[in-house]
Image: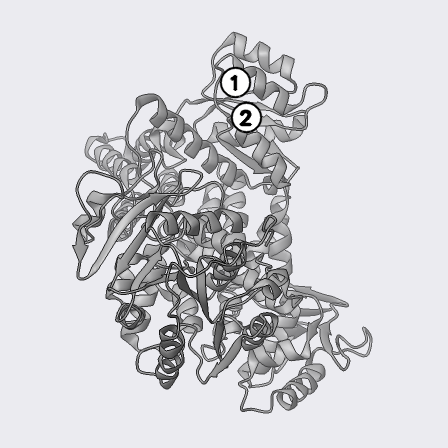
Amino acid sequence: MLTIRLLGEVSVIRGGEALALPPSKKTRALLAYLVATGRPQSRERLCRLLWEVPDDPRGALRWSLSKLRAVVDDPGDGARILADRDTVRFVPNGVACDLHALRAAAVARPIEALPVEHLRAVAEAVNGDFLEGLDLPTQPEFQAWCVAEREEARRHHAAVLGALVARLAPDAPEEALVHSRRLVALDAFDEQERAGLVELLARTGRREEAEQHVEAGLSALREAGLPAAELSRVGRQLRAARANRGSGGAGGEVGELEAVVRPALAVTAGSDAAMAGRRIVVVDDELELGRIVAEYLERHGFSVRTAASGAALDAVLASGSADLVVLDVNLPGEDGFAIARRLRARGGPPMLFLSAAAEVVDRVVGLELGAEDYLTKPFDLRELRARIQAALRRTEVVSTGSDRTVPGLSDGVSVGGDARPSVAASEARGFRLAKNGGTGGPRTKQGQEVRFCRSADGVQIAYATSGAGPPLLKPANWMTHLEHDWESPVWRHWLRELSRNHRLIRYDERCNGLSDWHAEDLSFDACERDLEAVIEAANLQRFPMLGISQGCAFAVAYAVQHPERVSRLVLYGGYARGWAKRGDAAQADTRAAFGTLMQHGWGVDNPASRQLFTSLFVPDGTSEQAQWFNELQRVSASPENAFRLHEVFGQVQIEALLPRVRVPTLVLHCVGDSVVPFEEGRRLARGIPGARFVQLEGRNHILLEEEPAWERFLAEVRPFLEADVAPNHEKAVEPVAGELRP
């Protein structure tokens, strides 16, 4: 049996003895990548992932594979590294891997049903972070994948440790304490897990350590600007227990500590005391699943009843009201949707849908029926609890009419219909805004005016104008913030130069920047309607467009649909097909890893994960530029919205529109762009009749002021736009008939 350990330092063990691995970090990284991904990888992908272009990547790959074969191949089990002319793969014959064991345990549903012995073995096999000490900062694609996998492994590790603590705490608190300490070490900002550790410390008589963890937790949470109300309350109760303890010896002290801490934590296990005693009805015909969910929620302070059908639910509600119904969609007889319609018609309690159906149409139907949320099976019990808590808080806000803020934003974001940074919060940071159509005129901040308009579905879009002269419209690209960009050393030279001889109009797309952060529809069509809303609000008649990155796709789509209004197109760093539409599985894997990183590392108070994106977008940036771009990621979008936008842009496909472009077009692309491959820029230019393509020498996706490619960009774009002398009264081209389907 061969054992490969990827959690901690990479190691290979045969017969209980560690084998010597090649000293090359890239060779060890190659082994880890092949084992972790578990599927064939193209040689081209592996070369791009691990070796710089000036090297001999194919020669380096061949050398590394020869070294690895000497370590992992076994005469008894056959070759484990198989390669042909195009691909390389690892065959796990007779191989045990700690990462795969951790993944399998963490995704088991319900994880609490796994044998304690199995959970214990999986947890004990984790010797550290994924690929500890094997970072390759000069290889951004590998590093992004590694960090994303590292975060995923931590989440899986936390799930296994959490299940162990839940199983062991009632009867084996001493052993549970070991795993609880490891769980808190994984995430010092998890108030719930910290409170659980305090409970176990109190139960086992470790009063001083319990108080130390309360203080350490409070310090970490306050420094990060996170809520700490429940941990504060537990700390007060611990101090009160110490002050009031009698003379009954250590045993009496432990009992007293447990008496005050255990009830507090049982009530506030969900990091919110308001959830205590809230009445939940779980409706699911899978009786065992219903029982597991009910028991789990009861352990966290909820009052739970169960039902297996619509009729049973009616009987339960007749015997007492409920604050929320967790309703399975696929019930026998009357399904969950039909039950929801009945409940809604008679003003019944809020609902959260559970279903194995993951199709978008099912989620849409459920949400349109008025459900607070929709969770697909299989699911993590902790995620279900978090969604229940969020749903209850939302319904409470609606019933009291109080204001809300979006979590994760330092200044607060109004969600009473418009989820965007409030005007008051923006002005507090020096961002002066003016609402389009409101009382009073726009306020100007250093030469730009920020206004708001509404898209067709009511979503508010923030747009800005700067400069004077003929109009130049820039469709939105990912990660913008009108005010932040105006001051940023990454973007300010763009805005200065583009506003020099033009009236520049740009905007933050929905779920981004100063525009609404809460928009149900985040499709290509919806984003295109945002562009149309800005055009109408700015009263533009005929104008050139400058598309950057995915903004190029919006520019092309609008130019095809409205050729009478668009005079010229400048397309920089763009593409006609998103990352999920290029037929490159390896590239799709990398982008999927980015998505995982966005979901779990975007909003944390640690710029390390955001730095990965910065190193891709502006790899040649100065430390100041990198810091500004790191901060742009934080202020431009929430983790959820960043992920949603990333997924939407991956699905872009407008190649069918390219031959229909009728306006002069200039396409520019950096040859070393790591965000949008150079070939995608060439492909974009080839598809547009008469388009001129300019190759720029550089690696930055966003051109920086000090690099030669920026001067070349200006030298090409300025005369191209100056040639745009077509006045607004010029004869318009007839619009293209038919509906756009990007």
Say the numbered circle drawn on residue 605: none
Give the labeled residue for mark 2: 369
State if disc 1 and disc 2 touch (CB < 8 Å): yes
What percent of the width, then of the height, locates residue 185?
40, 55
Neighbor class of circle 1 (other Cα within 10 Å; few <14, some 14-19, many 20+) is some
Classify the position of the N terminus by image quarter. bottom right
The image quarter containing residue 114 is: top right
> Is 632 left or right of 132, judged from the image as shown?
left
Q: Is residue 514 visible?
A: yes
Toward which corner of the image does residue 707 lie, by quadrant? bottom left
Vertical side of 143 occupied by 56: above or below: below
Q: Given the image, on which type of amino acid does mark 2 rest?
A: Leu
Query: Residue 682: x and y, percent?
Result: 57, 76
Q: From the viewer's side, name the closer residue of 324 and 96.
A: 324
Q: How is the image coloured?
A: one colour
Question: What residue is at 60 percent from the left and 74 percent from the top?
Answer: 686
Q: Nearer the viewer, residue 454 or 357?
A: 454
Mark seen at residue 344? 1
Question: Does residue 18 appear in this view?
Answer: no
Question: Which residue occupies 33% across, 44% down?
Answer: 453
Residue 368 spot, x, y in % from top left: 53, 29
The percent coordinates of residue 45 (x first, y second) are 63, 76
Which part of the image, by quadrant, shows the C terminus?
bottom right
What crowding class fits label 2: few (fewer than 14 Cα within 10 Å), some (14-19), or many (20 or more)? some
Left or right of 273, for residue 342: right
Residue nearest the observer in this picture, 92 or 512: 512
Which is more toward the observer, 181 or 218?
A: 218
Q: Tag 1, which secondary structure?
A: helix
Disc 1 marks which amino acid? Arg
Is 716 drawn above or below residue 519 in the view shown?
Answer: below
Instruction: Of the two numbered discs 2 and 1 on the same chain, state the one appearing first in sequence.
Output: 1
Residue drawn 37% across and 39% down? 199
